[in-house]
Image (cartoon, rainbow, N blue to C red):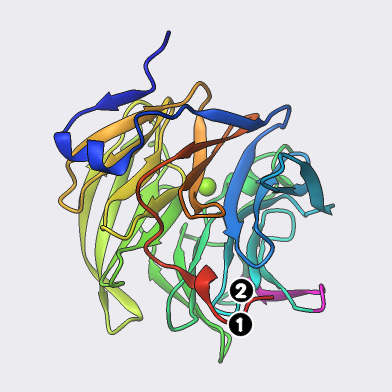
């Protein structure tokens, strides 16, 4: 039997549950992404990008469609009011689902040019929306609509929701992808899933110091992922960073040391903490949604807002 854990440091034992297995909650999808736990409805939303769907898993085991014709929605998160914020490849936008169910476009252009294809998104405690804008959703017609990029860079953006001002906070990534703040929001982590023209991939997660809550400085490599490249990432309330990779979810401590891995039988795209008692780690991996019980939970708990939809 294939082992479930690859423990690299004793500290990993305190973060996992040894008497549990990895459970496949749903399968038969095309490319799952964008998991987010929604406490107000006690369910998990996740995307199936090529199938143009946002799906909903509930603890009774049912998987139903939250939204069809999702415009190739990729990453999802909740804002401080518990509203769903999503990245759409098809419209090349970041959108918010309003409390009346309508969908409001929050960002679609930067410096007068269309965005590439927003990929993943987080909301800071001040309500600002930070998201990545690689070109995956316009490279072909599988996860979006093939198009020539208008942006000169693949940026990480900060959107001031109050003013609508969109600012590039860093623009030197090959393909910025997952992103997450440290528990005190003093550090932003950003995954680079891109490849150089010679086919090599840095496969790095970079860390930045957050200046004044709005800008980034002091770029450094936090971790290098193998096998594969990092896609979605999350930080737990201890400050450990959990990342996707080709064969596992990998956990790094705040100093960038690999503590251990949870082996997954499909290429992992993203992950999310949550569940009815906040003991689940949900994992989107290629055709499936998995979950495993862990002994830690999310750092940034916007979903604990008292103003949930
Ligand atoms: Mg992604």
Which mark, by number, is residue 82?
2
Query: Residue 172's quadrant in the figure?
Result: bottom left
Q: Which is more toward the observer, 216 or 76? A: 76
Q: Which is more toward the observer, 32 or 55? A: 55
Task: Indicate whether residue 252 is drawn in magenta.
Answer: no
Which mark, by number, is residue 307?
1
Answer left or right for 52 relative to 176: right
Q: Which secondary structure lies at badge 2?
A: loop
Q: Position of residue 220 (x, y in %)?
A: 20, 55
Residue at (65% x, 48% y) in the render: 46
Which quadrant: the C terminus? bottom right
Q: Position of residue 93 (x, y in %)?
A: 66, 65
Mark sitting earlier along the chain (2/1): 2
Q: Which secondary structure lies at badge 1?
A: loop
Residue at (31% x, 38% y) in the render: 202
- Using a 10 Å C-alpha cutoff, classify the residue at mark 2 as few (fewer than 14 neighbours), some (14 to 19) or many (20 or more): many
Residue at (68% x, 39% y) in the render: 140
The magenta span reads: 100-109
Query: Residue 32's quadrant in the figure?
Result: top right
Tell me: residue 280, above or below residue 226.
below
Label 2, ligand 1: CB separation under 8 Å: no
Q: Are marks 2 and 1 in contact (CB under 8 Å)?
A: yes
Q: Which is the main secondary structure of the residues drawn in magenta?
A: strand
Q: Position of residue 8 (x, y in %)?
A: 19, 29
Disc 2 from disc 1: Cα separation: 7 Å
The count of marks equals 2
Q: Is residue 226 visible?
A: yes
Which quadrant: the N terminus? top left
Answer left or right for 282 relative to 144: left
């Amino acid at each position: 039997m294939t082992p479930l854990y690859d423990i690299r440091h004793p500290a990993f034992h305190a973060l996992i549950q040894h008497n549990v297995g990895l459970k496949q909650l749903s399968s038969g999808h095309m490319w799952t992404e964008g998991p987010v736990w929604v406490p107000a409805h006690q369910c998990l939303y996740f995307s199936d990008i090529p199938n143009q769907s946002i799906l909903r898993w509930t603890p009774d085991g049912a998987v139903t469609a939250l939204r069809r014709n999702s415009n190739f929605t990729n990453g999802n998160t909740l804002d401080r009011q518990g509203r769903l914020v999503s990245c759409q490849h098809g419209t090349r936008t970041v959108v918010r689902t309003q409390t009346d169910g309508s969908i409001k476009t929050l960002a679609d252009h930067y410096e007068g040019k269309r965005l590439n294809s927003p990929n993943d998104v987080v909301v800071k405690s001040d309500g600002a929306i930070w998201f990545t804008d690689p070109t995956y959703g316009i490279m072909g017609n599988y996860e979006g609509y093939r198009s020539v990029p208008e942006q000169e860079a693949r940026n990480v953006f900060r959107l001031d929701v109050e003013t609508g001002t969109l600012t590039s906070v860093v623009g030197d990534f090959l393909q910025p992808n997952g992103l997450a703040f440290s528990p005190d929001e003093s550090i932003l982590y950003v995954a680079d899933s891109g490849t150089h023209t010679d086919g090599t991939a840095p496969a790095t997660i970079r860390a930045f110091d957050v200046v004044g809550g709005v800008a980034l400085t002091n770029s450094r490599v936090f971790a290098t992922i193998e096998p594969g490249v990092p896609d979605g990432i999350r930080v737990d309330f201890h400050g450990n960073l959990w990342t996707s990779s080709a064969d596992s979810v990998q956990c790094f401590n705040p100093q960038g040391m690999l503590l251990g891995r949870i082996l997954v039988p499909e290429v992992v795209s993203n992950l999310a903490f949550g569940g009815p008692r906040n003991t689940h780690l949900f994992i989107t991996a290629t055709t499936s949604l998995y979950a495993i019980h862990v002994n830690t939970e999310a750092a940034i708990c916007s979903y604990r807002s008292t103003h949930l939809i």
